[in-house]
Image (cartoon, rainbow, N blue to C red):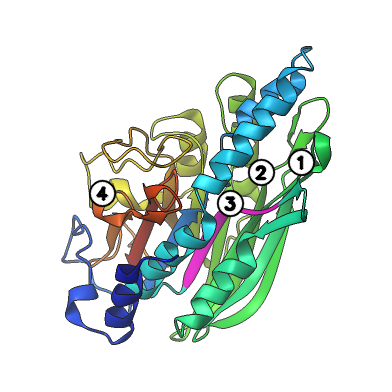
Amino acid sequence: MKPRMIYLSLALCLAGLPACQDDLTAPQDPNLKSEGPPVVVMTRNLYVGADLDVVIAALLSPDEDDDLAALGQAIATMQATDFGARAAAIVGEIARHRPTAVGLQEVSTIEIPTAQGVLVIDFLPILQATLAASGLNYTVAAEVTNIDLTLPFGARLVDKDVLLVAGGAQILSTSSGNYTTDLPLGFVTIKRGWVRADLRIAGKTMSVVSTHLESGPGGPGLIRQAQAAELVGLLPSGNAVILMGDLNDGPGSPMHGILTGGGLLDVWASVAPGQPGYTCCHAADLSNPTATLNQRIDYVMVRGGFTTGSGKLVGGARAEIIGEEPGDRVAGPFGLIWPSDHAGVVASLPPAR
């Protein structure tokens, strides 16, 4: 059952009451001038609902006896982290902030065989139905499939990145793709991808891109760097660019250096210097009420269009970490749970003159 307070919150936000206008972190330089209303974007890793690294490790190990136990534990965790309840919380965030574009990672389809037949949990239709029920008009502008994996015992996982665009924005073109560098793991290749929409908003053209780079240290870190370099090469040189997503590495990392070296400005670092802005990660079952995040791996970055000639954000740019406060938890099947194992990032970006 979806918690009553979520629907109350949605009703208040949809009515436009001031209580739903969250304070965003203030910019560094309020004297830089803007032209037109700000463009608001949100990035959100939805979280598949269980620690699949444990399942993959079990499948890769020579011990065949641990496969079923790992898969069973993952299924039990997915039941505890019910996406229907979490989707209502995500939609509440969208209702409060009204982003023009929403970048989503780990948009999953899960198929679980049961005695009664195959149980299908399909995140995107669940989220779309919740948006529609709340009167929010968002279009799937672009999507890309990264993983389509059939596991032992008939279970299946599909992983996608999705870019949602609000109904008021003019979509000029869309594209998507997978990076050429990926992570082979014997029985499966872990691909990563990107989604893009070129938009016309208030007379200005901009490219909005969302992505999910490879995770992990060592070899995966080198793959992540290669994907970041490929991403920089894919970004248009003429348009203003907003890049967002789960980039799976912190500020100061080689990956971060590749993106900033490609001219991208880290919005959180610009508007909240010295503040950690942690976005990751809660425990797999999402139930720990005192859990604290300890990494900043989810970003909004910009290049051109929202900056001045001196390389600073236009005055009035703001950012906020969302879904990280204990009050953001929602009622799951067995108690309160976080909306995701990640927090999200919302940025409000006034365009330059």
Kind of residue at disc 4: Pro
Q: Considering depth in this image, is 103 or 26 the residue closer to the camera?
A: 103
Residue in the picture at 75% in, 20% down = 60
Decide which of tag 3 and tag 4 comes sooner along the chain.
3
**At which x and y percent is residue 320?**
29, 57
Tell me the tag on residue 230: 2
Tell me how far mark 1 sits from mark 2, CA to CA. 8 Å
Above-or-below relation of 110 to 40 = above
Secondary structure state at the residue bearing disc 4 = helix
Q: Residues within 10 Å of mark 4 (few under 14, many from 20)?
A: some
**At which x and y percent is residue 254?**
49, 29
Residue in the picture at 68% in, 22% down = 57
Position of 340 with respect to 195 (left or right) is left
Q: Quadrant of the N terminus?
A: bottom left
Is residue 30 visible in the rendered image? The answer is yes
> Is 46 within the magenta?
no
Where residue 194 sits, quadrant-wise, is: bottom right
Kind of residue at disc 3: Thr
- Residue bearing mark 1: 180
Decide which of tag 3 and tag 2 comes sooner along the chain.
3
Above-or-below relation of 176 to 113 = below
Q: Mark 2 and mark 1 in contact (Cβ < 8 Å)?
A: yes
**At which x and y percent is residue 179?**
72, 44
- Residue bearing mark 3: 211
Tell me how far mark 1 sits from mark 3, CA to CA. 14 Å
